Image: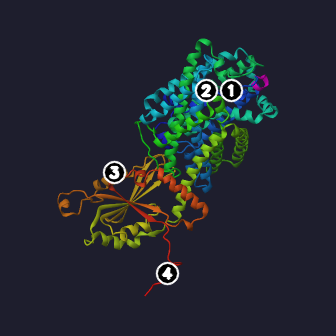
Amino acid sequence: MSSDSKNGINRLSAAGLLISLGIIFGDIGTSPLYVFKAIFNQGLIQKDLVFGGLSCVFWTLTLQTTIKYVLITLNADNKGEGGILSLYSLVKRKSKWLIIPAIIGASTLLADGMITPAITISSAIEGLAIYNPNFPTVPIVIAIISLLFLIQRFGTSIVGRLFGPLMLIWFSTIGVLGFSYIGQAPEVLKAINPIYAIETLINHPNALLLIGAIFLCTTGAEALYSDMGHAGKKNIRVSWIFVKIALILNYFGQGAWLIIHEGQAMGEQNPFYAIMPDWFLFCGITIASIAAIIASQAMISGSFTLIAEAVRLNIWPKVTIRYPSDQKGQLYVPSINIILYIGCLIIIAIFQKSVNMEAAYGLAINLTFIATSTLLIFFMLRKRVNKIWIFLFALIYFSIELTFLLGNIVKIKHGGWVTLLLATTIFVIMFAWYKARKIKNKHVRFINIKDYYPIISELSEDRSIPTFASQLVYLTSANAIHEIEAKIIYSILNKKPKRADVYWFVHVDVTDSPHGRNYVVNQLIPNKLIRIDFKLGFREEQKISLLFRKVVEDMVANGEIDITSQYETLKKHKIPGDFNFVVLEKIFTKTSDLSWRDRIIMECYRLLKYFGLSEEKGFGLDSSFVTLERVPLNIPNTENIKINRLS
């Protein structure tokens, strides 16, 4: 039985449906604010383009969102959790190169997290320009976004409880507004026929620009998968029926308004607000602004979760991760909060208006879709799905997504370069960190610990050597029980011999499952040398100091170990001995041995380490009980050194 079944998160319930509305559909649910504005791009309203654009939107939501994500991708759950890094964890053993699409998907999702708040909040607030065309909306957008990022440090669990009901009001509102307007031009319903979409894409002179604009209707589809762990696939699938109906009704209502105004210039008008009755307009702008803030909050929270996963999968530098509330899964990553905030301000400074942001939006998330499709194919292979179905999936969705990519590439010169630059920067950070760790691991030499059992036992009893610590703990990366880094033995025996009553080796294994806290204890030398292997899910907090203490307490309670200090006075009063963690920081002393590519990667790694957390903080160790030792990974040999001795 999967964990989502055990904890009931996958049960269909009213609460689950409300949660889905509140945190899953914010991004895709606010797309009616700007899709038709982007399709017509202030130009003349043409009836053929209304039918063609509507048909494209309808079938994009059907093929891309409903079939690919809701029906197919949600099946690729990792113990109830979703998202591109969860998917990568399921398939990474298939091939080493799959880290590339995983990093592309993660980096483009984060870049999307910078433009989503800017475009959604701007589109909503710009509705005020209906009252006054010269109304300064940019300062209000900046103020709302600043406040949104400011409150992240305090947690959003209280506000989060309101998200579901508020988004229920939003979807109900846009559905009713759209439905009420369809009656004024019912012929708009003919756009359901896919022939209109095909003819428009073939015959429209600016088909690529049109494709890029249409893609905006599905930009939030990835969130359906990324946030699956918060609501469960059944709740997402059922609530999507309501959401899709509301979206389609609103799009078709906007289409009816456009048909009525055929031949006119779109200009600064927004069909989304145009279908609202005058008496409802201010209320509509308010509801839209609230929905835009909720969509932005969902994207920010998703970015925090993504980075926390990336840190534990070793594709992002160790950074401070806080838990501002007791709500399950709520994180706050200060460094990412600042990066996203600065990114949003840059987007607003460059583009000013949502109509300009639309020209840049979609390129990054398009790459996420392609990366997800790539990993999904390997997931299907792992599940032994019929290869004919896998081939059809690849053919259909790579055709659709590569076509969208062609349309979005046109956006590069219109501002898409900004999000592409942001995504590329994040990709370089992730890839450099991942690759640098691989390079370092290649230079780590492991030895058989069994060969050192006698000397470790003797060292522990050698009274001629001062006691370094009663309990001496080393963090090791050795996967095999009887292996240890040569540098750890060097630290114990050669680099100022360290006598201790008990030596501990602690290994942390991040599993492919999102959750789980398990450990295994091996008494290599009974009561002298003990190894603990932690097996932690990639979404679990790595508070090694706390977890280690709990394990030791359990072992003491079970009579497996005695941690009483061996100092005579302390032993007499049965006082526990002190614990000291030794963290070895592996450094390169001679980078000339590396290829030029590896040298560049290691230079990037050094720079990133400067901004990241230290090893002891990254593992949640109390720095007052930590000894940090720097050890060289590659010691220059003396074979080629020539020197003359003078008599």
Q: Is residue 68 visible?
A: yes
The residues tagged by marks 4 and 3 sit, at their Cα atoms, a distance apart of 56 Å
How crowded is the residue under tag 2: few (<14 C-alpha within 10 Å), some, or many (20+)?
many
Q: Secondary structure at mark 2?
A: helix
First-in-chain label (1 vs 4):
1
Instruction: Give the CA distance from mark 2 to mark 1.
Output: 10 Å
Closer to the camera in the image, 641 or 177: 641
Pair 4/2: label in front: 4
| Residue type, mark 2 in image | Ser
Q: Residues within 10 Å of mark 4 (few under 14, many from 20)?
A: few
Quick check: marks 4 and 2 in contact, CB under 8 Å?
no
Q: Tell me, yes or no, whether the two marked residues, 2 and 1, touch with CB atoms within 8 Å.
A: yes
Residue at 50% x, 74% y: name it. 637
Residue beneath label 3, please?
550
Please name the amino acid that badge 3 sits on: Lys
Decide which of tag 1 and tag 3 comes sooner along the chain.
1
Amino acid type indicated by mark 4: Ile
Mark 4 / mark 2, whichever is N-terminal: 2
Amino acid at pointer 1: Lys
Q: Helix, strand or loop at disc 1? A: helix
Residue 46 counted in the magenta span = yes
Q: Which residue carries the number 2 mark?
A: 123
Task: Choose the circle earlier in sequence order: 2 or 1.
Answer: 1
SS of the residue at dot 3? helix
- Disc 1 + disc 3, Cβ < 8 Å: no
Q: Which residue is mark 1?
A: 37
Q: Which quadrant holds residue 125?
A: top right
**Viewed as shown, does residue 193 lie left or right of 161?**
right
